[in-house]
Amino acid sequence: MLKMLNLFREDVLFLVQNKYDIALVAFLSIATYAFLKARRKVNTSNKEDKIPGGLGLPFVGETFSFLSATNSTRGCYDFVRLRRKWYGKWFKTRMFGKIHVFVPSIEAAKKVFTNDFGEFNKGYIKSMATVVGEKSVFAVPIESHTRIRHVLSALFSMSSLSKFVEKFDQMLSQRLNKLEQNGKTFPVLPFTMKLTLDSMCNMLMSITEESLLQQILSDCAAVSDALLSVPLMIPGTTYYKGMKARQRLMEIFKEMIARRRSGKEYKDDFLQYLLERDSCPSSEKLEDSEIMDNLLTLLVSGQVSSAAAMMWSVKFLDENGEVLDKLREEQLDIAKNKQRGTSLSMEDINRMSYGLKVVKETLRMSNVVLWLPRVAQNDCTLDGVEMKKGWIVNVDATCIHFDPALYEDPMQFIPSRFDEMQKPYSFLPFGAGPRTCLGIEMAKLSMLVFLHRLTSGYEWTIEERDPSMEKTTHVPRLRSGLPITLKALTKNGK
Ligand code: HEM
């Protein structure tokens, strides 16, 4: 009864917070249900019932409750948290016409990721493939995936990453300095969003013109918002705005490629590297449409997650003074051996052993990628639990990261826990298996440079501690953006 009341409350909340996109989902869900009901009987075999959970109405299921959580300041993981309280660690639900099982164990995670592209596969919703592009490494089948991933990996070579560190460090240092000088409070999130995007635009395509960077920033935000939207080209919807933003971005990339191909422009960057591979065998190069979709993929996948993780690191350090002191000590020691104004080198980064643990602990606790969805290609068992073909298996990285059997005092921010090796598949911020994040090293490096400049150069005050989460986003972020004010440290670090 209590559960039912809770469910009802969630649905009412959904109606109160109703948005245009969500109303569309409601309409489409009911229409599709009526259509499906007329065509076939809905499958409710006994196997489904072995995993606890509420499937709700056929097709619609708990879609509205999920959307309600996503559209609230509690964040979309609240939907999972609540059901885990009701049903236990394993539970199933039905959303958008599909049965989802939330998978909380490392044994199951191992099976899913070692059988990715085989027994399990990514089942992208249409919006994701069309907005980011059908040739994106996110959306292509295995044959193209291996080739595209291989070509893109050059961006993350040692020499390429050292150049990135230098550039990122210069940009960051100048911007922090300016912010401190003008003494104003600023929210960390928009700052890190712009910083990460600008640095990637620079590395990928040598874009430095401010008006163009601003346009790319707002268009990438629209694309990112549209990734999990209802794929209907109706003006005003998130999907429509995302598709329009995609078209503008494609136009920018296309013109840039044309200028480079005609010889009117030459820049020493990743785009040039890709274009110069024209004479390579087809297994070693990308077509222009693949280049464009994957430039967008790299921008979108790298920006939001890294920027959010940086924001969370500021919050966690502020709440854990001892950790901050220890990190600052390490970073000041690195800073004192460097001449003022010189950029960090890879050797400096390699000395940040405590910094790296702070980065890992931030990623464990912030869970910027909450869970990793795959579709079961056949009936199978995961950790002894039966799954059926077509079910969505959500490897719940958040649940694994907060499992007290894997991490002692999981709700505490304790970087030194990473002194010990983690159990395989217990640390999943970057996923695992053949689809592991391509940008792991770049993400860690940019977080380390960020922490270095912040802690060795400044102390800060958080001006607003509202814990509300940003609405309608799949990446957990504080709604306030975490406003802070900086104060420069004096020479002796005080
Ligand atoms: C803190 C920052 C980051 C986090 C937490 C993160 C997390 C992830 C995760 C969990 C996946 C796997 C998704 C899945 O298996 O379904 C992934 C994939 C990916 N990430 Fe990242 N990422 C970060 C930064 C970056 C950066 C900086 C880039 C590049 C500039 C990047 C590029 C990619 C790409 C291209 C994929 C797709 C790989 C494939 O499908 O083969 N990521 N990321």
Image (cartoon, helix red, strand yellow):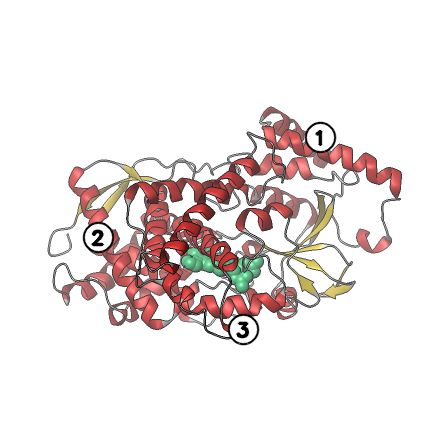
Residue mark closest to the camera, 2 vs 3: 3
Question: Which residue, as the protein is rendered here, is positioned at the far top?
Answer: 16
Q: Nearer the viewer, residue 160 or 170?
A: 160
- The reply to whether callout 3 and callout 1 are in contact (CB within 8 Å) is no
- The spot of residue 217 in percent (x, y) is 39, 43
Q: Which residue is mark 1?
A: 27
Q: Nearer the viewer, residue 100 or 50?
A: 100
- The spot of residue 482 in percent (x, y) is 35, 40
Residue 8 horizontal side relative to residue 268, left or right? right
Q: Which residue is mark 2?
A: 173
Residue 348 horizontal side relative to residue 431, left or right? left
The tally of labels here is 3
- Label 1: how many residues lie within 10 Å, few (<14), some (14-19) or many (20+)? few
Amino acid type of the residue tagged 2 in the rendering: Ser
Dot 3: element: helix
Mark nearer the N terminus (3 vs 1): 1
